[in-house]
Image: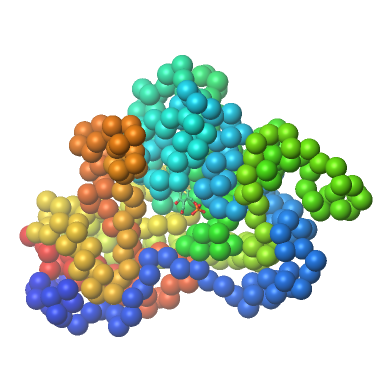
């Protein structure tokens, strides 16, 4: 896109008029009257926690993502923990994952007393690089844990092939990728277990919530027990069977998702397709606008995927700019565009540094270089056309002011 030159003085950060009067967040939920009614109906029913809505949500979700089973959890993080447990991760084991993710991905490995081993990402998609993963496989490796960064599916076929030859389990963190497609298949049954989140910035929300989808009934049974203290039956099953006896067969947690949340999830799931279509439309508008804007590199999309666009992370081409990421980030915020950064590489967080001795500067060059240049633009299905136009205008204004 062509832009008229903008002086740095015209930027809102320097006292100029902002592009918007009010802050546009980077992500936001959309709750309809039907969603509210669905929740109200449950509040008037007999079951607030694990009742009929949990199974109903799980079935609808499994069928949506093409998996045999789905098991609901109280958050995406709890679902990742469940998957790490069901995979049998234990002290001494290693799970290979990406540094460019939310800390919860790697933390799920730590919850099991196992060790997260990071491997660098591909320079185009910023997803876990299969070649780097292959270099990190040792006799201790038990799990490969790719993340579908920003909603672009990871290389699950490569990871599945590695898992077959080394006897490993693949857990796909698809918290960004509900509805994404990889080689014509929906993300949901491409890995041994696939984990989703229903945080409000996601495609479908339950407030807090998560899900593990799997075709493996043994994993599904373990997951159901793990989220319910390790107990082998649910209170509702016992009540309807007129029984009081139950057995705790493993050490689990209370990671249950409530019927109230599941009612919201069922109602929200009905709008997944239009939500995805809207996000894809917004991404297409951004990409057309930014393709020709010097200093901005839009996210890459590989030919074999259809991303779900949880995020729209641009990378700055700093050689073409007189400002760094922090300056451009601040300038966009001042224009009232709620930009964000995904992610601070996990190995550079103080906890990981002090526990594992990781440091920035060398071991994961692609992830670390990307981190210095990434900015996530607002991306959510409830954005209006005017919101999208404001983002494009603000990015063009700020980038133009900082162009060399
Ligand atoms: C990649 C990734 N994994 C895991 C999670 C954790 O999900 P939750 O916030 O539902 O616990 C998130 C959170 O947004 C995420 O982005």
Of residues 286 and 32, the one nearer the viewer is 32
Residue drawn at x 34%, y 41% is: 351
Residue 195 rendering spot, x and y as whole percentages: 55, 45
Q: Residue furthest right?
A: 242
Residue drawn at x 40%, y 46% is: 103
Q: Is residue 109 visible?
A: yes
**Which quadrant of the figure contains the N terminus?**
bottom left
Residue 30 rendering spot, x and y as whole percentages: 53, 71
Report the coloring of the rendering: rainbow
The number of callouts visible is 0
Residue drawn at x 12%, y 55% is: 320
Residue 186 rendering spot, x and y as whole percentages: 57, 46
Q: Is residue 294 left or right of residue 387?
A: left
Give above or below for 69 relative to 257: above
Residue drawn at x 19%, y 57% is: 325
Q: Is residue 276 visible?
A: no
Give above or below for 58 relative to 206: above
Of residues 22 and 231, the one nearer the viewer is 231
Of residues 108 and 66, the one nearer the viewer is 108
Q: Is residue 107 left or right of residue 342?
A: right
Q: Quadrant of the rendered structure where residue 272 is?
A: bottom right
Q: Is residue 274 left or right of residue 254?
A: left
Of residues 321 and 54, the one nearer the viewer is 54
Q: Residue furthest top?
A: 139
**Which quadrant of the figure contains the C terminus?**
bottom left
């Amino acid at each position: 896109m062509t832009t008229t030159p903008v002086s740095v003085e015209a930027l809102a950060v320097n006292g100029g008029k902002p592009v918007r009067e009010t802050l546009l967040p980077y992500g936001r939920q959309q709750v309809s009257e039907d969603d509210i009614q669905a929740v109200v109906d449950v509040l008037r029913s007999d079951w607030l926690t694990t009742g009929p809505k949990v199974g109903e949500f799980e079935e609808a979700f499994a069928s949506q993502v093409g998996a045999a089973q789905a098991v609901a959890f109280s958050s995406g993080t709890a679902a990742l923990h469940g998957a790490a447990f069901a995979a049998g991760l234990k002290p001494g084991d290693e799970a290979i994952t990406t540094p460019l993710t939310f800390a919860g991905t790697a933390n799920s490995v730590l919850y099991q007393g196992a060790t997260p081993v990071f491997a660098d990402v591909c320079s185009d998609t910023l997803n876990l690089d299969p070649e780097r993963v292959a270099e990190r496989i040792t006799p201790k490796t038990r799990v490969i844990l790719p993340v579908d960064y920003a909603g672009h599916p990871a290389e699950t076929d490569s990871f599945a092939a590695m898992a077959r030859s080394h006897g490993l389990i693949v857990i796909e963190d698809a918290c960004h990728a509900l509805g994404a497609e990889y080689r014509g298949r929906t993300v949901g049954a491409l890995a041994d277990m696939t984990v989703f989140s229903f945080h409000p910035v996601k495609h479908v929300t339950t407030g807090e919530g998560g899900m593990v989808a799997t075709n493996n009934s043994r994993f599904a049974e373990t997951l159901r027990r793990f989220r319910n203290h390790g107990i082998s039956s649910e209170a509702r099953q016992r009540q309807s069977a007129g029984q009081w006896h139950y057995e705790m067969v493993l050490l689990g947690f209370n990671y249950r998702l409530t019927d109230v949340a599941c009612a919201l999830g069922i109602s929200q799931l009905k709008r997944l397709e239009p939500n995805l279509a809207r996000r894809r439309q917004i991404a297409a508008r951004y990409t057309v606008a930014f393709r020709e804007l010097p200093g901005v590199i839009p996210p890459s999309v590989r030919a074999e995927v259809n991303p779900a666009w949880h995020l729209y992370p641009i990378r700055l081409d700093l050689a073409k700019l007189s400002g760094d990421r922090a300056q451009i980030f601040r300038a966009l915020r001042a224009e009232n565009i709620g930009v964000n950064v995904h992610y601070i590489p996990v190995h550079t967080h103080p906890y990981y540094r002090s526990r594992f001795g990781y440091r920035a500067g060398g071991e994961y060059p692609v992830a670390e270089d990307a981190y210095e240049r990434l900015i996530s633009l607002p991306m959510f299905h409830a954005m209006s056309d005017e919101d999208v136009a404001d983002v494009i205008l603000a990015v063009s204004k700020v980038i133009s002011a900082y162009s060399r």
